[in-house]
Amino acid sequence: MHIFDRLKNGDLVRLDDPEFALVGEVVDRTLALIPQLNGATDTGSVRDILGDIIGQDIDKSTTIFAPFYTNFGRFISIGKNVFINHACSFLDLGGITIEDHVLIGPKVNLITENHPLEKTERRNLICKAIIIKRNAWIGAGATILPGVTIGENAVVAAGAVVSRDVPADTVVGGIPAKVIKHL
């Protein structure tokens, strides 16, 4: 199986894997484009440059405010009518899917990458996808950890650290995030 498939599949990927250079090539390209994205002076340019990074046209109904950070970019998918505020960071080797009508507050971290606990394996990667369902709202400074799905219409309170799936139509908050109420 190709390294990109193994990353998205959640398999252990060693940094000395012979195919890891392919990841490095994408990372280098992305790192070269990020300063251009973050130096853009209008949201249309930000959208176009991020579309180039992720390899997908981003719908004109979607707005992304710079600065925006990603280490890879190719495994991000962004729907229509999405709003991503300033200073968000997406580590996407495991895959990030943002469905339509999602709101993402400033300084949100979406992190799909993790390392094994065993000290001899710790420098390797285990990645798991993040999925943010339609009409969800992620509050300022929230962190979503690997393998989490945020349900449709759910709200993640500002500053929350989400380590488990969030049911649809709920509000979660805290560290670790817990259901505060049902909508």
Image (spheres, rainbow, N blue to C red):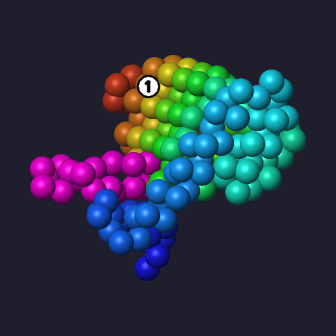
Which secondary structure type mostly characterizes the magenta part of the structure?
loop
Nearer the observer, 123 or 98: 123
Q: Quadrant of residue 140?
A: top right
* Residue 81: in magenta span: no
Residue 59 placement (x, y as % from top left) = 83, 46
- Figure quadrant of residue 48: top right
Magenta residues, as a range?
Answer: 112-128
Residue 124 within the magenta-colored segment of the rendering: yes
Residue 174: quadrant of the picture: top left
| Above or below, 60 relative to 21 | above
17 relative position to 48: left or right: left
Q: Can I make out residue 101 in this image?
A: no
| 102 or 153, nearer to the observer | 102
Left or right placement of residue 113 versus residue 15 in this view: right
* Identity of the residue drawn at 71% across and 43% down: 50
Q: Identify which residue is drawn at 37% across, 39% down.
A: 163
Residue 50 visible to an observer of this rendering: yes
Number of numbered discs present? 1
Q: Toward the viewer: 23 or 160?
A: 23
Q: Residues within 10 Å of mark 1 (few under 14, many from 20)?
A: many
Label 1's element?
loop
Using the image, determine if residue 31 lies above or below residue 74. above
Q: Residue at x 45, y 42 (%)?
A: 111
Mark 1 = which residue? Answer: 160
Image coords of residue 91 (percent x, y): 49, 44
Residue 17, percent from left and from top: 33, 68
Above or below for 1 versus 117: below
Q: Quadrant of the C terminus?
A: top right
At a point 21% along the width and 51% down the height, the residue shown is 122
Where is residue 107 shown, x and y percent of the image?
54, 23
Residue at the far left in the pictured view: 119
The residue type indicated by label 1 comes to Ala
